[in-house]
Image (cartoon, rainbow, N blue to C red):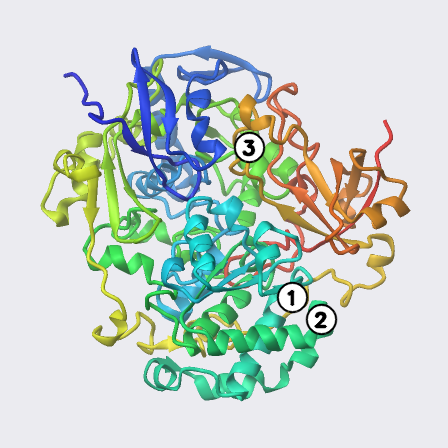
Amino acid sequence: MQSKLSKNGHFICLRCHQKCYLKAVVKEGKVTEVKDAVCIKGATIPDLMYHPDRILYPMKRLGKRGEGKWERISWDQATSEIASKLNDISERYGSHTIYVVTGSGQKHIGWQVETLGKKLFDTANTHGGRYTCIIPEVMADFATVGELLTYEFNPCYKDSNLIVFWGANPDVGTPAQVREARAALKKGAKLIVVDPRPIPMAKKADVWLRIRPGTDAALGLAMLHVIINEELYDKDFVGRYTYGFERLKEHVQQFTPEWAAPITWLKEEDIIKAARLLGTVRPWCLYARCGSVSQQINSAQNARCMACLLAITGNIDVPGGNTLFFRTFTDAMLMDTYPMRPGIRPSPNAEKGFMGAGKYPMMHFGHMCDMPGTVRGMYDGKVRGMWIVADNLVVAEQDSWKVFEGLKKIDLVVVPELFMTPTAEVADYVLPAAHYAEIDNLVGTFLEPYDYATAYRKIVEPQGECWDDRRMIIEVAKKAGREVFWEDLEDFLNFRLQYFGMTFDEACNLPDGKIQLPKPWRRYETSVPPFQTPSGKVELYSTVFEAIGVPPLPTFVENPISPVTTPEIFEDYPFIYMHIRLTAFQHTEGRQIERQRKMRPDPILEINPEAATKLGIKEGDWVKLEVPTPKFKGKYIKFRAKFVPEMDPRLVGGDHGWWFPEKPAPEHGFGDSNINAILSLDTGPYEPTVGNIQCRAIACKVTKFEE
């Protein structure tokens, strides 16, 4: 039967979080141009789709892993052999030894595959690659309000009178949404930026807090101190809808701005000024990101501070505040369109094999296994099979070399991909993934007004023998004799819309393919209970954190290696390293796309020019960066130096996610300029709610690189 194609060329871009609504120009069955793109990643979709290196056929490894020997096979052979090997692993070692892992590539699709794999392969051990990304923040938000609150889905910029960007660079991370933020600023909204780097928004800020990386909770506690003691909080909201306010009030008395100033490298008067803005300007909204609420051992507590600030000032689920995004979808009975998780779990018996369930119960709640434990499991037999979708795991995960070698040791590695990455190079089967313009899809949209999902047909037919990632896992499960609930992808998409009483085809024929969802404000006023927490209120004192042995009130903990905890280390490693997210790429993606690579040909290390000059470094020089971890003594990564006068001389900032498609296989240079190659998963401490290591605010030294 002839498959259906889009009638108007409209589709949703999945190259980053924004889910922009784009229009493809199609000539002779090919996408030749993309209109309405707000960033280079959208504009270069045709470049990616028709790149000569794109994988177009199923391939099976010949010889040893990493030798680069492959044979083209049929889909029937691929699905049959993979199914047989997965069944063998389940029978011999248990289905919990199969891991389904996804990352940020092909947004939505990987998360859906991960969840399908959980059910179809009967394993609790799935992971969204987010424990160093969104998950510490998610767990803190859920513990506080029973919902995601501080992420990029949540701020309602257009009606806001004050915007806070805390460890977030919206011009890079949310290029579509930032237009609404800029419009609000033009109308007179105030702006607070908490960031050590001179990001574009910092130059427009009413208050720019150039914080020491890793001390965000100290700042948050000090601002809570000011707002509570000066009685700038929303007394009605606090009295009716919060739990534990008196405990929080008592707790923050010790955390004065005077105490926080030397810890954070901020001026006491600036902390007070920012706090008073939060307490007096209403409504205000906040967007927090990896610079503050992930990749540190105190990530969840940083996010808890922010959630408490929003709560006590009454800026939850109000126009211009932070909306309850996920609730918009669940209220409408639509299965969560981002991860598609509710209701799809493995068997209770398989849940017992969840990696990290005892140590990190919040991860279990979030349907994600302990990733450092998973990497160790590659070596001790606890991991036997791995399906890695939309995730360049070797480059994206810390301790990259350990991951790379670990993948060679397990029984089965399946990697659906667009290109041969360092991760794909050590797979047993590499499967050709269809691009998101080549698939039918239902997407939750993250832009204003946060109240619709979009259905669209594929724009063009997939190239070669590329398959939709979801089709791959469904067909393998059928071959494995598993109970599969969907006949095909159309049936699966109809399933996701079952509560709306419409089919996927009917949704595609709605105006612009948009399914409008009702979203009233202040839903806590009519909900029973008002919030989905144990107390039914916003938990300033978290009973969930208390139950799992984590401090129930926001708490500041110094980094394990910092100028305060280990001053002797900073004598030899005098800089603090932080990541830089790039406009040109989405994490590890896009290095082989010429138009994108021209924007950033080489990995860059931002450094203060005076600090660099003292080290004999000129702008444009290659420099090497080393960390004090004994495991990596004598190891280094390389960057080109870029002078940034506004950068604190004690800090440096490096590009993340680098590998080099043009360098020899199988490594493709993944260890040359990637901080993950010199971060160890072997030693703690680990973040207590989700188990990530400290992978920001890292002590390092920088020297000129000599060939």
Q: Give amino acid for label 2.
A: Ile
- The answer to whether any part of residue 138 appears in the image is yes
Q: CA distance from mark 2 to mark 3?
A: 41 Å
The C terminus appears in which quarter of the rendering?
top right
What amino acid type should be assigned to the residue bearing mark 1?
A: Thr
- Tag 1 residue: 215
Question: Could you say which is closer to the camera, residue 161 or residue 72?
Answer: 161
Residue 155 in the image, given as x and y percentages of width and height: 40, 59
Confirm or deny contact between disc 2 and disc 1 (CB under 8 A). Answer: yes
The residue positioned 43% from the left and 35% from the top of the image is 15
Q: Residues within 10 Å of mark 1 (few under 14, many from 20)?
A: many
Residue type indicated by callout 3 = Leu
Residue 227: horizontal and vertical position, in percent?
52, 82
Question: Of the residues under marks 2 and 3, which one precedes in the sequence?
Answer: 2
Q: Which residue is mark 3?
A: 407
Q: Which residue position holds label 2? A: 263
Tell me where residue 645 appears, x and y as whole percent: 76, 50
Q: Is residue 310 left or right of residue 519?
A: right
User: Relative to 60, is 489 above or below?
Assistant: below
